[in-house]
Amino acid sequence: MKSSNALKALLAAASLALPLTVSAESNVQSGAGTLNATAHVDFEIVIPQILYLRVGTGSSYTTGALTSNPAIDLITFSPTAAQVGSGTAITGTGGDITGSTETAAIVSNFGSVTLTSTSTGALSDGAAGDSIAFTQITTTATANTYGTTLQAPVLSNGAGSTVTINAPASKVIQADAKWAFSYANTTTPPAGTYGGAGVNNGRVVYTASMP
């Protein structure tokens, strides 16, 4: 019995609190003839600002369910001895589309977006002290899923270029592309491995910004 009384007291207290957070309307009409009773409900939808950037392996962005994916791809260029310094661009390996090609996408809902690329400096071979400039890596953007093709910032040692994606009247941006990376191969560097997975200045950071 004590438990039952305690439960009733708890339910009574909860019912007193409900009008503070949930309100409803009722209307009673009486009398002869046609009667009309009205009640009203107010609705509000709060949409958060969204900024989604994908370069390489990442979550789906065309289904409306945007999520994060921490995977970082490694693009590797391996010219043969006969190719080194020939001036013929080299296609690499890696990339979520393979053949040194990556998926790139931006989705946002609050106006124009800028996209920049940043590196720590030229790709280094570590202790040997030699380097290859990021300007030797070029990016070609081609159409993917959306009607707007996302252009790629030009890579350089340090701060790269900035690409601006102007929002349409709807303020919603849906832009993507296939970014094909290639090694220009216009110089003959000393033998070695330059850059790498998070080492020797091998990483480029792409940053999307929305006002």
Image: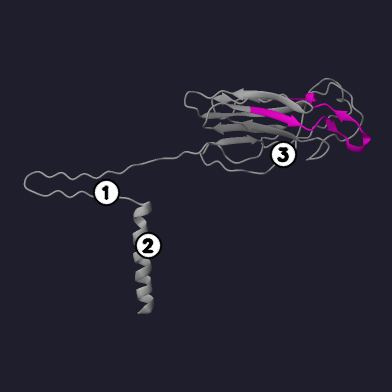
Find the distance from the CA under tag 2 to the CA under tag 1.
19 Å
What is the secondary structure assignment of the residue under circle 2? helix
Find the distance from the CA under tag 3 to the CA under tag 2.
53 Å
Confirm whether the magenta stretch covers residue 171: no
Which tag, 3 or 1, sits closer to the chain's start? 1
Q: Mark 2 belongs to which amino acid?
A: Ala
Q: Visible in this render: residue 139?
A: no
Furthest toward the bottom, the residue is 1
Q: Give the residue number, with chain letter if any, for mark 1.
A: 25
Q: Is residue 210 left or right of residue 47?
A: right
Closer to viewer: mark 3 or mark 2: 2
Which tag, 2 or 1, sits closer to the chain's start? 2
Foreground residue among 103 and 44: 44
Q: Give the residue number, with chain letter if any, for mark 2.
A: 14
Confirm whether the magenta stretch covers residue 116: yes
Q: Mark 1 belongs to which amino acid?
A: Glu
Instruction: Name above or below for residue 15 compared with residue 68.
Output: below
Residue 19 sits in quarter: bottom left
Foreground residue among 131 and 181: 131
Instruction: Name above or below for residue 132 compared with residue 27.
Output: above
Residue 87: x %, y % from top left? 83, 20
Q: Residue at x 71, y 34 (%)?
A: 205
Q: Give the residue number, with chain letter if any, for mark 3.
A: 73
Q: Which residue is drawn at 35% across and 75% down?
A: 4
Q: Mark 3 belongs to which amino acid?
A: Asp
Residue 2: x %, y % from top left? 37, 78
Which tag, 3 or 2, sits closer to the chain's start? 2
- The image's colour scheme reads one colour
